């Protein structure tokens, strides 16, 4: 049975104050440059300045569109430190 796939470009960053990891849609981090509030320490920071990785995530879907698996499709090299 062939599964359909959906994709999401994800940027991973670390809070500069406490080191908590964050994974956000890259359009939110890279294009908008939006600030976030850390759920661990409560401080506000900009993930674009503290990005650690950027990957393409693949969601394997069944025939009705339900997610069956999530995989790292590939590394997106423009953001690797």
Image (cartoon, helix red, strand yellow):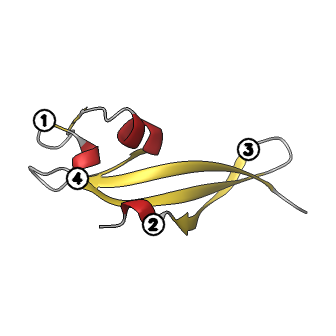
Are the residues flagged by discs 2 and 1 in contact, CB closer than 8 Å? no
How far is the residue under mark 1 from the one under mark 3? 34 Å
Alpha carbon distance from label 3 to label 2 = 29 Å
Res 45 quadrant in image: top left
Quadrant location of the N terminus in the rendered image: bottom right
Measuring 17% from the left and 43% from the top, which residue is drawn there? 40
Where is residue 15? Give x, y as percent: 18, 50
Looking at the rendered image, the disc whose residue lies closer to the viewer, 3 or 4, is 4
Q: CA distance from mark 2 to mark 4?
A: 15 Å
Q: Is residue 62 above or below residue 78?
A: above
The answer to whether 2 appears left or right of 8 in the picture is: right
**Residue marked by disc 3:** 66
Viewer-nearest of discs 2 and 1: 2
Question: Are dots 3 and 4 in contact, CB under 8 Å?
Answer: no
Q: Dot 4 corresponds to which residue?
A: 50
The tag on residue 77 is 2
Marks 1,4: beta carbons within 8 A: no
Residue assigned mark 1 = 42
Residue 42 locus on image (x, y percent): 13, 35
Q: Does label 2 or label 1 sit earlier along the sequence?
A: 1
Q: Residues within 10 Å of mark 1 (few under 14, many from 20)?
A: few
- Which circle marks residue 34 in the picture? none
Secondary structure beneath dot 2 equals: helix
In this rendering, the label closer to the viewer, 1 or 4: 4
Q: Earlier in the sequence, mark 2 or mark 4?
A: 4
**How far apart are the two marked residues, 1 and 4, measured between alpha carbons?**
16 Å
Which comes sooner in the sequence, label 3 or label 4? 4
Q: Position of residue 43 (x, y in %)?
A: 11, 36
Total marks placed? 4
SS category of the residue bearing label 1: loop
Does label 3 or label 2 sit earlier along the sequence?
3
Q: Which of the two marks, 1 or 3, is nearer to us in this view?
A: 1
């Amino acid at each position: 049975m062939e599964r359909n796939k959906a994709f999401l470009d994800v940027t991973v960053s670390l809070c500069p104050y406490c080191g908590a990891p964050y994974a956000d849609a890259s359009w939110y981090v890279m294009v908008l440059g939006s600030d976030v509030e850390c759920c661990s320490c409560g401080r506000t920071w900009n993930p674009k300045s503290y990005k650690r990785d950027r990957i393409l995530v693949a969601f394997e879907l069944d025939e009705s569109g339900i997610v069956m698996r999530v995989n790292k499709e590939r590394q997106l090299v423009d953001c690797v430190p």
